Amino acid sequence: MVGFEKERETLEGMGVAVVAASVDALDKAEEVANEVGFPVGFGVTRDIADKLGSWWEDRRSIVQPSEFLLDADNKVVMSSYSDGPLGRVEAADVVKLVNFYESRK
């Protein structure tokens, strides 16, 4: 999430809001939230993960990294799912992707 913090001003200038959520309790989520300037939700349950469209892992009762880019109408235009530390979307790639979508308009 630190990468998204580094690109936060650029993303905000493009009209992109970053929001994160975690299964962690409030105190742990606050540790992360203190390092970034965007909202970090806490206490995500399986029900919430299902509503978000995220990938829930039963074995550890956690939500796996699930990333979504929504357009102005809240339509999902990109999604990414990962079951480990590899394959996560980089903030700089989101900037490029938003620029690409804007160039197609």
Image (cartoon, rainbow, N blue to C red):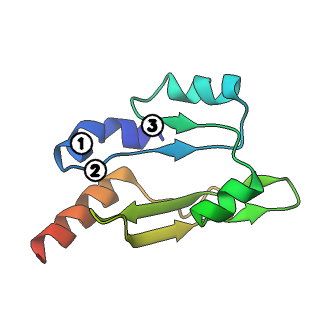
| Residue visible at 18% across and 50% down in the picture | 14
The residue under label 1 is: 12
Residue at far right of view:
59
Q: Earlier in the sequence, mark 2 or mark 3?
A: 3
Q: Which mark is residue 86?
A: none
State the SS at label 1.
helix
In the rendered structure, the answer to whether residue 81 lies left or right of residue 97 reads right
C-alpha distance separating marks 2 and 3: 16 Å
Q: Which residue is tagged 2?
A: 16
In the rendered image, which quarter is residue 46 located in?
Answer: bottom right
Q: Residue at x 26, y 62 (%)?
A: 72
Q: Amino acid at mark 3?
A: Val
Q: Position of residue 81 (x, y in %)?
A: 58, 67
Kindly identify which numbered label has been placed on residue 2: 3
Dot 1 amino acid type: Glu
- Residue 36's place in the image compared with 76, above or below, is above
Regarding mark 3 in the picture, which secondary structure is present there? helix
The C terminus appears in which quarter of the rendering?
A: bottom left
Query: How many neighbours does mark 3 have within 10 angstroms: few (below 14), some (14-19), or many (20 or more)?
Result: few
Q: Position of residue 3 (x, y in %)?
A: 40, 42
